[in-house]
Image (cartoon, helix red, strand yellow):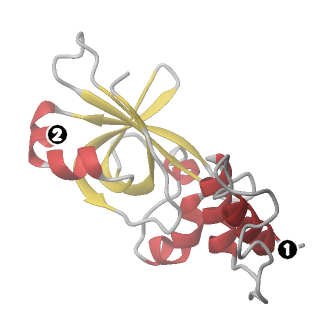
């Protein structure tokens, strides 16, 4: 049984319940279905389990990001402090500690790693809608290094559309 056939059967069986007779669900046997693309496999994994162990959402956009000069997270770590760069990734966390003077911190993750993004109160206000609602971002800013941690001081935020859905853990 292929993954697509298994998903079809699971979906049909999900409609069985105490008000239906066992074994009489219609459409349990899947019709002949085409194979799933890598993106479809990742979407199915995320839908079924909440994660995809074989892929990361940004990898399906990497060719276009590379062409636009947008760095991978691991590449940002190798650039010198003060350099202006663009990095793209999934927003995994949004945090605004009460002791940070209105600064908001984002965790930006791609298929190569995790980068801390620092958003000043003014930047957050300018890009509030994009910053709060986008599952993934292209962040342009200046690299900073302190205590062996690399941060990107955000200067501009742009939304990035993902083919694979994802959610972040915000303000916890």
**Nearer to the camera, 159 or 113:** 159
Q: Residues within 10 Å of mark 1 (few under 14, many from 20)?
A: few
Instruction: Report the Cα–Cα distance between label 2 and label 1.
Output: 46 Å
Element carrying mark 2: helix
Left or right: where 87 falls relative to 63: left
Q: Residues within 10 Å of mark 2 (few under 14, many from 20)?
A: many
Element carrying mark 1: loop
Give the x, y percent position of residue 94. Answer: 35, 33
**Nearer to the camera, 11 or 167:** 11
- Which residue is drawn at the image coordinates 75% and 87% (left, top)? 33
On screen, residue 36 above or below 12: below
Q: Earlier in the sequence, mark 2 or mark 1?
A: 1
The residue where tag 2 is placed is 124
Res. 134 mark: none
Q: Nearer the viewer, mark 2 or mark 1?
A: 1
CB under 8 Å between callouts 2 and 1?
Answer: no
Left or right: where 157 falls relative to 85: left
Q: Residue furthest right?
A: 1
Give the x, y percent position of residue 85. Answer: 36, 55
- Which residue is drawn at the image coordinates 27% and 23% (left, top)? 96
- Which residue is drawn at the image coordinates 9% and 37% (left, top)? 122
**Nearer to the camera, 28 or 33:** 28
Give the x, y percent position of residue 57. Answer: 56, 60
Name the quadrant of the N terminus: bottom right
Q: Residue furthest top?
A: 99
- Which residue is drawn at the image coordinates 69% and 79% (left, top)? 37
The residue where tag 1 is placed is 2
């Amino acid at each position: 049984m292929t993954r697509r056939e298994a998903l079809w059967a699971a979906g049909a069986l999900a409609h069985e319940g105490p008000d239906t007779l066992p074994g009489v669900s219609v459409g349990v046997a899947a019709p002949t279905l085409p194979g799933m693309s890598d993106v479809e496999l990742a979407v199915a994994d995320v839908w079924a389990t909440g994660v995809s162990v074989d892929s990361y959402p940004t990898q399906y956009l990497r060719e276009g990001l590379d062409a636009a000069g947008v760095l991978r997270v691991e590449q940002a770590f190798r650039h010198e402090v003060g350099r202006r760069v663009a990095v793209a990734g999934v927003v995994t966390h949004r945090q605004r500690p009460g002791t940070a003077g209105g600064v908001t911190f984002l965790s930006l993750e791609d298929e190569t790693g995790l980068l801390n993004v620092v958003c000043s109160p003014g930047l957050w206000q300018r890009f509030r809608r994009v910053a709060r609602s986008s599952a993934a971002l292209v962040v342009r800013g200046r690299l900073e290094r302190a205590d062996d941690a690399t941060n990107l001081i955000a200067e501009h935020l742009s939304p990035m559309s993902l083919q694979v859905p994802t959610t972040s853990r915000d303000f916890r």
